[in-house]
Amino acid sequence: MNTDALVDRLESFATTLPGLVAGVTTDDACWRPKRNQWSILEIVNHMVDIETGDMRLRLSMTLDDPTKPWPAIDPQAWVKERRHNERDLDGSVLRFIAERNTSVDWLRTLDDPAWDNAYEHPKFGPMCAGDILAAWTAHDILHTRQICKRLFQLTKRDALPYSTDYAGTWIE
């Protein structure tokens, strides 16, 4: 595993995220294309939740003692319970950046981590610490795509009655 490349990607996302959402208005940040789909603001706050209550915590636990049970998480419920769509976008982005910087600083202090330590996940089976780091990095990319899709949908909405078809179509 190229740990340095993965950690570098995690670090760079702290500068990518603000650029992705720069200029998004409060109304657009809260907009959902469908009732069951997350807004940009909910996506950003989900990423803060995952940074603090999932990836960093679970990776640390797996490295320290992979037999210790992980705390439960419920990202879908957190969106409503924690009122993600009522928060401030700029403040949420700043919170993400601060937490990500803490994560990267911690990752860079690890001395010969046991990437093969495996936690027995009830749904995914054995999950090595290395799997968690890889998934953490991939999680950023998946939500980058999700934010880009919301921006595309906002553009289509705001362009009406005109069409964005000349630009191309969104490929799922």
Image: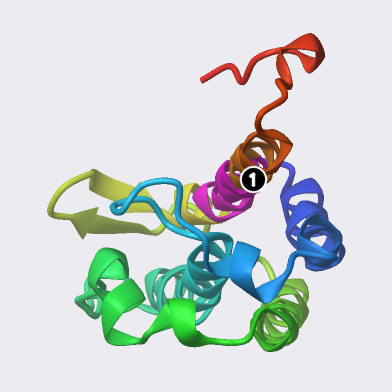
Of 47 and 85, the residue lying toward us: 85
- Which residue corresponds to mark 1? 154
Q: Is residue 38 left or right of residue 143?
A: left
Across the whole image, how many numbered discs are drawn on residues? Answer: 1
Say above or below: 54 vs 37.
below
Question: What residue is at 27 percent from the left and 84 percent from the top?
Answer: 81
Coordinates of residue 33 in the picture (x, y in percent): 45, 47
Q: Over which residues does the magenta segment extend?
A: 134-148
Question: What residue is at 41 percent from the left and 72 percent from the top?
Answer: 54
Q: Is residue 127 left or right of residue 166?
A: left
Task: Look at the image and say whether residue 142 sits in the magenta stretch.
Answer: yes
Coordinates of residue 70 in the picture (x, y in percent): 25, 75
Question: What residue is at 66 percent from the left and 79 percent from the top?
Answer: 89
Coordinates of residue 125 in the picture (x, y in percent): 20, 45
Mark 1 residue element: helix
Task: Look at the image and say whether residue 149 sits in the magenta stretch.
Answer: no
Say above or below: 37 vs 19.
above
Q: Is residue 12 left or right of residue 122?
A: right
Of 13 and 24, the residue lying toward us: 24
